[in-house]
Image (cartoon, rainbow, N blue to C red):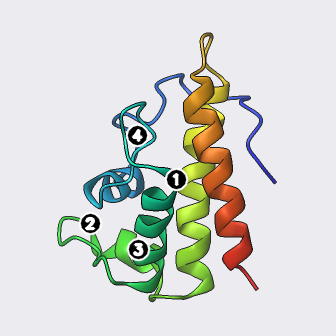
Amino acid sequence: ELATGSGGDGTGWEGSSAASGFLQEAGYTVRKDGPSTAKRQQILTEVLQGKIKLPNWLSETVQIQWGAPNSDERLKKIRNTLNVALGTQLGRSNPSAQAIKKWTTDIEFLDTKSG
């Protein structure tokens, strides 16, 4: 299920959580001049597979939430991180259509990875 945009503080991706900070550090972004669909999805896949390691600055509690590489927990954590960002963007008074399209595409891509 995709986010609907109800709720959220309208701030979008910026400064939200440790989870989105980790994906940003890994190179994932939906900025207009950001990486292509293939590159974004490669980053998400490498995070899922553990090829991109969890950073040391994530607290132990947060690292546990990410689960092991290739686990359902990690897949859900990545998907939920994108879905929260999508919902927040949808809740804005002037949402970014291109960001919404990219997040939706990437969530659908992640859905093909789940059992």
Looking at the image, tell me whether mark 2 or mark 3 is earlier in sequence order.
Answer: 3
- Dot in front, 3 or 4: 3
- The Cα–Cα distance between marks 2 and 3, rounded to whole angstroms, is 14 Å
Q: Looking at the image, which residue is at 74% across and 29% down?
A: 6
Q: Which residue is mark 3?
A: 47
The C terminus, quarter of image: bottom right
* Residue 64, position as x, y percentages in the image: 41, 80
Q: Which residue is mark 4?
A: 16
Looking at the image, tell me whether mark 1 or mark 2 is earlier in sequence order.
Answer: 1
Q: Which residue is mark 2?
A: 58
- The Cα–Cα distance between marks 1 and 3, rounded to whole angstroms, is 15 Å
> Tag 4, which secondary structure?
loop
> Tag 2, which secondary structure?
loop
> Tag 1, which secondary structure?
helix
- Dot in front, 4 or 1: 1
Mark 3 residue type: Val
Above or below, 22 against 77 in this view is: above
- The Cα–Cα distance between marks 3 and 4, rounded to whole angstroms, is 19 Å
- The Cα–Cα distance between marks 4 and 1, rounded to whole angstroms, is 22 Å
Answer yes or no: do the residues labelled 2 and 3 have beta carbons within 8 Å? no
Looking at the image, tell me whether mark 4 or mark 2 is earlier in sequence order.
Answer: 4
Q: Which residue is mark 1?
A: 37
Mark 2 residue type: Leu
Q: Looking at the image, which residue is at 32% across and 51% down?
A: 24
Q: Looking at the image, which residue is at 53% across and 64% down?
A: 78
- The Cα–Cα distance between marks 4 and 2, rounded to whole angstroms, is 14 Å
Answer yes or no: do the residues labelled 4 and 2 have beta carbons within 8 Å? no
